[in-house]
Image: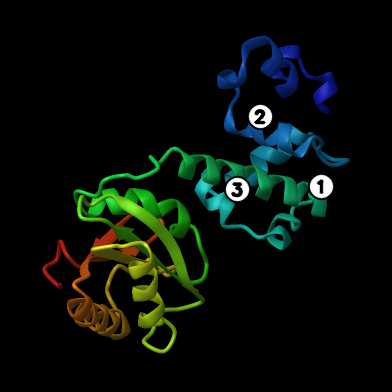
Amino acid sequence: MTIKLLAKDDRPREKFLQKGKSSLSDSELLAIIMGSGSRDESALELARKILSSVNNSWHQLSLLSSKELMKFKGIGEVKALSIIAALEIGKRRAVQEIPDKPVISNSKDAYFILKNQLSDLRTEEFWALFLNQSNKVVHTSQLTQGGISQSIVDVRVLFKTALDHFSTGIIIAHNHPSGSLKPSKEDISITQKIKEAGKTLSIQLLDHIIITQDTYFSFSDEGLL
């Protein structure tokens, strides 16, 4: 059965126009993004199948690559890119909701700022928040991609950025795509190296946060700083 043969209330576009965006289910929203289904099933049926494969989680769907999406019959390159682009827009919108200079009071505040950047990645990235004396974030920076170790994280670049923005505090963060919250030996080593380097410049390392898909680990909260 194609969408054209469904009752009007079951047609995503018509339902959107008549009842508004909030009336649509997740599968109906995805069907609108895709525009059409395959010869064998409607866009709505295809959307339900795709969402079902990721436990109806937008977050899990955002982890799929274009090649993985194209394994579904009826999803070509254009539709796959449309889905990925729509999810990226949602991610960027979430980031823009963060105040220009948020104040960091605890590890949860830092996690809230960085989770949209780090929680759904398949490779490790290293980020830093640079704070002023009032604990306001004056700059956010991605420092590395692909891993975290003493050979990859350039401490000189980290502190040059801090000095450029007149920062007095730094919060570093990286993700663990594996889902493990346990710090590695390299995590602990680089944390201590940055902490010691900061003492010379009177720039305090306030925290190191490890981020997974749905939670985080704070070195400060666990007494490791």
x and y, in percent, of residue 150 in the image: 36, 87
Q: Residue placed at 82% from the left, 36% from the top?
A: 36
For residue 88, the mark is 3
Query: Which quadrant of the view contains residue 14?
Result: top right
Label 3: which secondary element: helix
Q: Is residue 104 above or below residue 99?
A: below
x and y, in percent, of residue 25 in the image: 58, 27
Q: Is residue 10 left or right of residue 25?
A: right
Label 2: which secondary element: helix
Q: Are marks 1 and 3 in contact (CB under 8 Å)?
A: no
Q: Which residue in the protein does label 1 denote?
A: 74
The residue carrying pointer 2 sits among few (fewer than 14), some (14 to 19) or many (20 or more) residues within 10 Å by Cα, namely many
Label 1: which secondary element: loop
The residue carrying pointer 3 sits among few (fewer than 14), some (14 to 19) or many (20 or more) residues within 10 Å by Cα, namely few
Q: Amino acid at mark 2?
A: Glu
Q: Which residue in the protein does label 2 denote?
A: 28
Residue farthest toward the right in the current orientation of the protein: 39
Q: Earlier in the sequence, mark 2 or mark 3?
A: 2
Query: Which quadrant of the view contains residue 163?
Result: bottom left
- Of the 4 image quadrants, the one containing the N terminus is top right
Residue 149 appears in the picture as rendered:
yes
Nearer to me, 10 or 115: 115
Q: Amino acid at mark 3?
A: Glu
Residue farthest toward the left in the current orientation of the protein: 223
Residue farthest toward the top in the current orientation of the protein: 18
Residue 209 appears in the picture as rendered:
no
Q: Is residue 11 above or below residue 195?
A: above
For residue 87, the mark is none
Q: Amino acid at mark 1?
A: Gly
Q: Is residue 58 above or below residue 121?
A: above
Rounded to the nearest angstrom, the CA distance separating label 1 from label 3 is 22 Å
